[in-house]
Amino acid sequence: MTSASVPQSNTTTRSWFPRNLWDNERAVGVMFLLPAVLYIVLLVGLPFLIAILFSVSDVTVGDTSLDFVGTENFSDVATVDGFQYALANSFKFTIISQIGIIIMANILAVILTQQFRGKWFVRFLLILPWATPVALGTIGWLWFFDSAFSPIDWVLREVFGLLGPGTLLGPAKNIVWLGKPELAQFAVILVQVWRMTPLAAVILMAGLTSIPQDILDQAEVDGSRFFRTLFRVKLPMILPIMIISLLFSTIFTFGDMTVVFILTRGGPVYYTQILPTWSFFVGIQGGDLGQGAAIAMFLFPLLLAVAVVMLRIARRTEVN
Amino acid sequence: MSVVEIKDVAKQFGDVRAVDGVSLQISTGEFLVILGPSGCGKTTLMRLVAGLEQPSHGEIWIGDRNMNGLPPRMRQIAMVFQSYALYPHMSVYQNIAFPLKAKRQELSKVERDEKVHQAAAMVSIGHLLSRKPRQLSGGERQRVAIARALVTEPMVLLLDEPLSNLDAKLRAAARDELKEFQRRLGITTIFVTHDQVEAMGLGDRIVVMESGKVQQIGTPQAIYDDPDNTFVATFLGSPSMNLLPTDHYELGFRPEHFLPATRVDGSDSIKFTFHVKRVEYLGSDRLLYGFVDGFPETSLTLAKLPISVDDPVEVGSSYEFAVRNLAIKRFDKESGLRWDGGKS
Ligand SMILES: Nc1ncnc2c1ncn2[C@@H]1O[C@H](COP(=O)(O)OP(=O)(O)OP(=O)(O)O)[C@@H](O)[C@H]1O
Ligand SMILES: [Mg+2]
């Protein structure tokens, strides 16, 4: 350094912004956290508090005054048929679809981590259901399950001859997927599996490709073949990732109302009713905000449990 | 009798020729070290023997069978990777038992259990069987990897730089242990390393490789004393061999053979005037950096004086130094090959 005229920008404090603030880790930390904190407080925390407040009050769309009624809303909603179906279905649909998702996602992830031509195209196709807005995708499925024009029915009838008078699946010309309790439930679960599988598969693929090549080579040298390597080495190694993906899709499935709302609106009768749709029908369409909030409150324990498990896993992987 | 025979094997990756026409024979119970700089194709050669890669050319025979096209599990080999590649979710016991189960050896539970305990005892890790790999030290992991390799009683043990993840002290201990243990079991071993000290200490024979080709095969002493070419001459030894260009050939001699003339038997030696430019004290040795008369100042020449040679040496002064004729190697200037025919 020969010249003294070189501006020493890091020591002059001409700007209004105190330079050394960036050196203050506390201040910088607070600044970086602030947007996230605001987001959570305003868009998650506040509505949650309001929901709790509503669930213990007599608020309706017509009378927005909040009068404390204790647990009255909870006991009122709990005795209604629709609610009991909704509660049971919420768990049933979520659990069954998670089983489907994890099986499908594993199969897809294993296939898509093999070497073959046109892999990128298959991967692209795989992502589509997930990239499509839920509502759009579900409307597509609504047409698939149409009572008169279902293409599934058409294939069964015209291609395989399994549908129609004097055939295996009966005299009717249509299956009417969404009109029969079991089939409607099956349809809802199928669409949930269809829409959550891609995300789970992508997460599992990331897990599979992160297994060190050395380990796979070692397994080969040790004499292990495809299925042993898969079930004894690969899948156990990505188990933590699999659990995370399972928890994610559990939350998404459990809290989703779009699929049921578009496909069946909870019907026939209450056979595909779930907590989110029931809460919407009672609270918003029925106008009883207090009861709607009370119904939604039943989602909370499971979501809380899932969140706790997730955080524990996250902490465990952090320690290792 | 040779257990492994590598016949003119080549391996091409795209336009990289990782292994280029290697031929080798390894006899029963031999400890063969493959030595070479990074990227010279050592690991690739090992993977070819293991069956993790198939040769682009040539044949690999193990125990009198042509192994081309056969997967690793049919080759009666075991391999230890540089990273040890322990299955992180399995206990030490499960790790060692894995090849037994995977190779579908017809074993009862009791027999298998016995084999696992035997293998563990061989490398003294019997007390660690219930631990997970992450609860082990580097040295312990290495032993687990070796136990897992030995449990199936392979014909050939392949080790790819198994000591490079250990710290210096542990490495020396592990090296001795490995050698002792290989002798005791008499298992044919191929050991890959880029560390010449490791190679000299462990190998019955050393294969020196460079850019996919074998440069020389021989006992540690033969390789050190009688290098076939300038690559081998300069790759082994620290500091490396002095090479002085003359009109007809390159003159090579090791720094430890370059001594004050009074210390060398005068009748059969070549004398040089040595200008000392720098002196380094290394405790047991002195390293002298300089150049010799008759050669350009840029061809740096080193002398390594053991502590017993206590002649005073001053920086900037010149001395009469000499090398015994026997210690001098001559290499062709173009090809780098030994000019005096080698095998002196
Ligand atoms: N699968 C592969 N595809 C393409 N090139 C490869 C592959 N494996 C190795 N090579 C190339 O072959 C050459 C030899 O690699 P190799 O791993 O055998 O070297 P090495 O002697 O084991 O080196 P190091 O001491 O660093 O382990 C290198 O140039 C490397 O880039
Ligand atoms: Mg290597």
Image: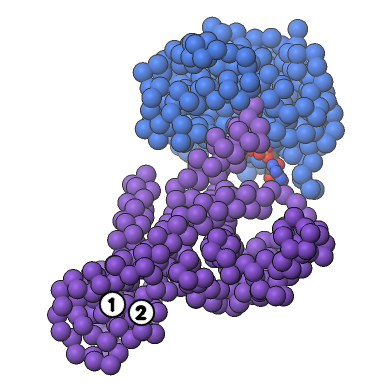
Q: Give x and y (percent) for residue B113.
A: 48, 14
**Location of residue A74 (image quadrant):** bottom left
Q: Give x and y (percent) for residue B180.
A: 50, 11
Residue A206 visible to an observer of this rendering: no
Which is more toward the observer, B50 or B58? Answer: B50
Query: What residue appears at the point 38 percent right and 28 percent down from the top-left corner?
Result: B131
Label 1: which residue?
A291
Q: Is residue B300 above or below residue B188?
A: below
Q: Chain of mark 2?
A: A
Query: What secondary structure is found at the residue carrying circle 1?
Result: helix
Chain identifier, purple in the render: A
Q: Give x and y (percent) for residue A209.
A: 58, 50
Asked if residue B330 lies left or right of residue B184, the reply is: right
Distance Cα–Cα, label 2 vs label 1: 7 Å
Quadrant where ligand 1 appears = top right
Q: Is residue B292 above or below residue A132?
A: above
Q: Which amino acid type corresponds to the residue marked 1 in the rendered image?
A: Gln
Which is more toward the observer, B252 or B76? Answer: B76
Q: Give x and y (percent) for residue B294.
A: 68, 35
Query: What residue appears at the point 67 percent right and 66 percent down from the top-left corner?
Result: A175
- Answer few, some or many: residues within 10 Å of disc 2's Cα (few below 14, many 20 plus, some between 14 and 19): many
Confirm if mark 1 falls within 8 A of ligand 1: no
Q: Colour of chain B?
A: blue
Query: What secondary structure is found at the residue carrying circle 2?
Result: helix
- Answer few, some or many: residues within 10 Å of disc 1's Cα (few below 14, many 20 plus, some between 14 and 19): many
Quarter of the image that includes the N terminus of chain B: top right
Dot 2 and dot 1 residues touching (CB under 8 Å):
yes
Quarter of the image that includes the C terminus of chain B: top right
